[in-house]
Amino acid sequence: MRHKDELGKRGEALAARYLEDAGLRIIDRNWRCTLGEIDLVAVDGATLVVVEVKTRSSEAYGHPLEAITPGKLERLYLLASRWARAHDLRFSGFRVDAVAIVDGGVEEPVIEHLRAVS
Amino acid sequence: MPLGRSYAVSLVGLNGYIVEVESDIGQTLPAFVLLGLPDASLSEARERIRAAARNAGLPLTRRKITVNLVPASLPKRGSGFDLAIVMSALAAAGDVRNCGRTVFLSELGLDGRLRPIRGVLPAVMAAVDAGFTSVVVSSGNAAEAALVPSAEVRSYDSLAEVALAFGADPACVALPAPQLSEASARADQPGAVVIPKDMSDVAGQSEARFAVEVAAAGAHNLMMVGPPGAGKTMLAERLPGILPDLTDKQAMEVTAIHSLGNSEFCRELQRRPPFESPHHTASAASIIGGGSGIPRPGAASRAHRGVLFLDEAPEYQRRILDALREPLESGELVLHRAAGTATYPARFQLILAANPCPCGQATGKGIGCNCSAQQRRRYFDRMSAPLLDRVDLQLAVHRVALQDFSGTAAADTSAAVATRVAAARAAQHERLSKWELSTNAEVPAPLLHNDLRLTRKATVSVDKKIEKAAITKRGYDRVLRVAWTIADLAGRSSPNADDVTTALLFRTQEEPA
């Protein structure tokens, strides 16, 4: 497995734990369809939460949050409704969260969680 | 509450308006949104600010920054808002403390250095008028900003220094390496030796020299008609040298206009009257003022309180010459464009020079001139009668004869003439100050015929002209104004018959050859 994929996997695991500590319930991981992939699917109360996790080993090429483009966000909103339809579940609403992790491997990773990004 | 606030100034012409720069930080993906009618160069501020802040050691927050320039309806242009925007954004993020009522006027370089901007003088004047006395500028603008009395000016070289002054963490900020500023680099170079232009350089031409002296003393407009090489341009260039120094208020006006221009940054008040001589191929926008967006001042405004010299006047586009009639009366130019209206002062002294005919040889007996009568007429018709009506002194300049520049006594120097001019100006001030006028050229016609009425004996020569309908009423008034100036130069308390006759000679020589 290549280093960047390994880093991404580790980041997603870290993010899942972080979100569960924050009170969200993770109900799916790495769900794929023709449109793309959702890193984490969670439920916050009655709200469906689609989470995009970005992990980087340093900020040398920009902060992970800066890598989430408007196009990506738009796709995540579409993916949220696709996921709900595919699983035939209904929610009072849905939102997209972003989790940024900077993990250099030496120090404790820095995790930032943004709710309802737009 | 993550809200930052700072202030800047938006200039519309010479009028400045305080702009409040407010920043909000939203808890969402990184973005930088700039609201409030920014133009293209101001929109580029986003990229400059991001780089400058990072290189100053204070990277902008990784959230959504929304910057709003209030009032949103006022169009804003240029790069002078950079520092205000970054300070507002840093204050919102808590990197620096609240900036209070401080006005920031500077552009940012990518390395975080502050760069000087245009129009600092009028901007600081506007800020002080609006009650914002604390101003931060770049070091290059420090001298100019300090010209405004009662402004508390602080100047810095870099964003890092400004941030430190507003309570940034000294451990974070990165001061850029010192570098020789442009101004000090230029100061080290020896300037070219300027040969002063002195009245004594003009050979002969005693009559024309006197006319220039009268023009200077009474602030009259002057037209000189003569063959090429007679010295018209020389005389015109020497007029600013015999005009008195500008008063504090006038110097402020002149320096403010020059602050908007493209010349060097102002270091001190401009005390000497400016001299502008646009070429006759110049466009209307360059002389009157104009350009895209908010109109910029033209040569007529840059000549404010000084001399606007139009050499080869009939060669100018007629509409440009006619556009000068309005500022000649009102002393200002109001420029209306879709993007806004700008008012620039333009109280200049107009000096026109013209050849007597298209080939320039129709002087004296006109030997050697091969222009037809119609060509000559058409040549002068390009200068409209209403324009010429505003020119008090109209003078024929003849070729210099040999005896004029060989062996005769040296002519008066500019310093000697300037002394006489200053005395004449003082006399005018004493006589006219109760009507809030300062020069004879400004005296309105009713005043000439009531409080300043001359005796019938003094005006006999010009009365005869008006009886014969050889002169208009407006022309009559102008003769009287010039007569007053001639009397002031001679130290008389009011013009006598000779002064009026001399003034009349300057008026009726308008027909060339």
Image (cartoon, rainbow, N blue to C red):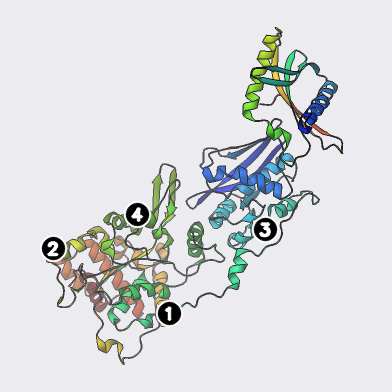
Is residue B458 visible in the rendered image? The answer is no
Measure how far apart labels 3 and 1 are at the Cα level: 44 Å
Question: Does B282 sit left or right of A43 as displayed?
Answer: left
The chain ID associated with circle 2 is B
In the rendered view, tell whether residue A74 sits above or below residue B508. Answer: above
In the rendered view, tell whether residue B177 sits above or below residue A61. Answer: below
The residue carrying pointer 4 sits among few (fewer than 14), some (14 to 19) or many (20 or more) residues within 10 Å by Cα, namely some
Q: Which residue is mark 1?
A: B419
Q: Residue at x 59, y 47 (%)?
A: B81
Mark 2 or mark 4, earlier in chain:
4
Q: Which residue is mark 4?
A: B284
Q: Which residue is mark 3?
A: B157
Measure how far apart labels 4 and 1 are at the Cα level: 37 Å
Mark 4 or mark 1, earlier in chain:
4
Measure how far apart labels 2 and 1 are at the Cα level: 45 Å
Pick whichever, B332 or B264, lies toward us. B264
| Secondary structure type for disc 1 | helix
The chain ID associated with circle 4 is B
